[in-house]
Amino acid sequence: MAQSHDTPLTTPFASRHAALGARIVEFGGWLMPLQYSGILEEHRAVRARAGLFDLSHMGELFIEGPEAAAGLAYALSTDPGILKVGRAHYSMMLFPEGGILDDLIVYRLGDERFMIVANASNATVVSDALAERLAGWRAVLDDRSLATALVALQGPRAAGILAPLTDVALDGLRYYAIAEGHVAGVPALVARTGYTGEDGFEVFVDVSAAGTVWDALLDAGRAEGVLPVGLGARDTLRLEAGMPLYGNELGPDTTPDEAGLGRVVHFTKEGDFVGRSALEKARADGPRKKLVGLTIQGRGIARHGYPVFSGDRRIGTVTSGTLSPTLGEPVAMAYVTPSEAEPGTIVDVGIRDGRVPAQVVALPFYRRPA
Amino acid sequence: MVPQDLRYTKEHEWVRIVGNLATVGITGYASEQLGDIVFVELPELGRTVTQFSAVGVIESVKAVSDLFAPVGGEVVEANSELANSPELLNADPFGKGWMLRIRLADAGQVDRLLDAAAYEALTSEG
């Protein structure tokens, strides 16, 4: 339970990050690598080859019991009961008022067994809320966040690097699928999920044996040009891929519809779920704002919190922005009033003392070659 | 080790004084802390700047920071290569990554700057 600690937590890879020369920052209650060789170089390695990420700060919550599926359908925006064993989907935990408490991935590990992966900064809140919402259901919550290390290998060469090290048949492991097996001889859950816009894998292992897995992946990857990748490039990669970040694009003041993620609210599922009535009303009222992509037409980078204008009228706020390493131009995501959200619309972003024109574009900015 | 013949600011600019011309850049420590620099905004030529005022902007992938004038005077030259090659600030901060030349208004202002030893002490404190 990350946030209840006053001193930041460290992952099992802390000494390896130090040896690799990482710059360390505190994020979500954890000391995490921001970058090793540099954000741009790490970003490009993931797009062209592969990168290895320490994501052990993420929360891993296991839910088991005869009513695990039904309980989760009440607790979350989606209906995890529709998942086949070994499959996953993107989901959200909502506030009763309809805002987003966290975005997460639900994996079905068995008929009566699920794993939820939550953001580090929300892991404690999600764990507590889940415990509360599952009360009365025949399901048990086991928060294994501190006992579980998560390593991601992402990029076009990820499958080729991982395959010789695992007994999981990667050819049969589809996008958003998960399988139990071993990696470098260590018992592991291997999922074909990620947050980079590339093909790749997330490997969940017990912290006690995590170092073996990290070393094996990095050693095997060296010949393929794999670099260790920090949170800095993780952010630029996900931004290019148009993926939202909790605290930037998602939060209590935003509904899934406004974030362009209405598909993760399964209104058709049976029974009530937390947030249902509020979202039904919000959907009837229409969105107050819409998430859009922006390409900046002038010089400067639109960053989190910068205002967006149409003429003299303030119409929105930038949620994330960077210079896209792949496109070579500044890109951003922003919430704007729905009438200004059509792709092609020209708006202005307030960057310091000036106004810089930007064009509304469809997300994502980057899609990997088929 | 930073170049011993330069003067420094607490905000991690360096300045080389030759006659009444001051060449200005940011230190290796600063460029390393910022990470990959992707955008630089410099003042227009002819503008008169005051010592320690914000005169430009340096953006890395992660962050924005101000460039402060180590000395006051008229901006007489700006490194035009930085518009297309901002990465020079990372690759060669004390050389090709120079940013501005300022014609010194008051040579006495140089006394308010740190020498190499004092700047090194500042950055080694962590």
Image: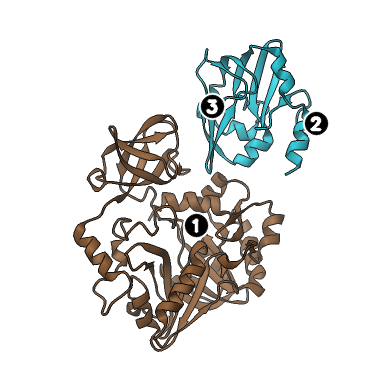
Chain colours: A brown, B cyan
Eyeballing the image, is A362 above or below A119?
A: above
Residue hosting label 3: B56
> Circle 1 sits in a helix, a strand or a loop, which is it?
loop
Let me know if marks 3 and 2 both belong to one chain. Answer: yes
Asked whether residue A226 is in view, the answer is no
Residue hosting label 1: A155
Let me know if marks 1 and 2 both belong to one chain. Answer: no
Residue A32, percent across and down?
A: 61, 57
Residue B110, percent across and down?
A: 71, 19
Q: Quadrant of residue A166?
A: bottom right
Disc 2 marks a residue whose amino acid type is Ala
Please report contact status of discs 1 and 3: CB closer than 8 Å, yes or no: no
The quarter of the rendered structure image containing the C terminus of chain A is: bottom left
Q: Earlier in the sequence, mark 3 or mark 2?
A: 3
Residue hosting label 2: B117
Instruction: State which chain disc 2 sits on.
Output: B
In the rendered structure, the answer to whether residue A83 lies left or right of residue B90 reads left
In the rendered structure, the answer to whether residue A86 lies left or right of residue A283 reads right
A326 and A125: which one is in front? A125
A258 and B38: which one is in front? A258
Let me know if marks 1 and 3 both belong to one chain. Answer: no
Disc 3 marks a residue whose amino acid type is Gly
Please report contact status of discs 3 and 2: CB closer than 8 Å, yes or no: no
Residue occupying the point 31% across, 69% down: A275
Residue occupying the point 57% across, 54% down: A229
The quarter of the rendered structure image containing the N terminus of chain A is: bottom right
Please state which of the two labelled residues, at mark 1 or mark 2, is closer to the viewer: 2
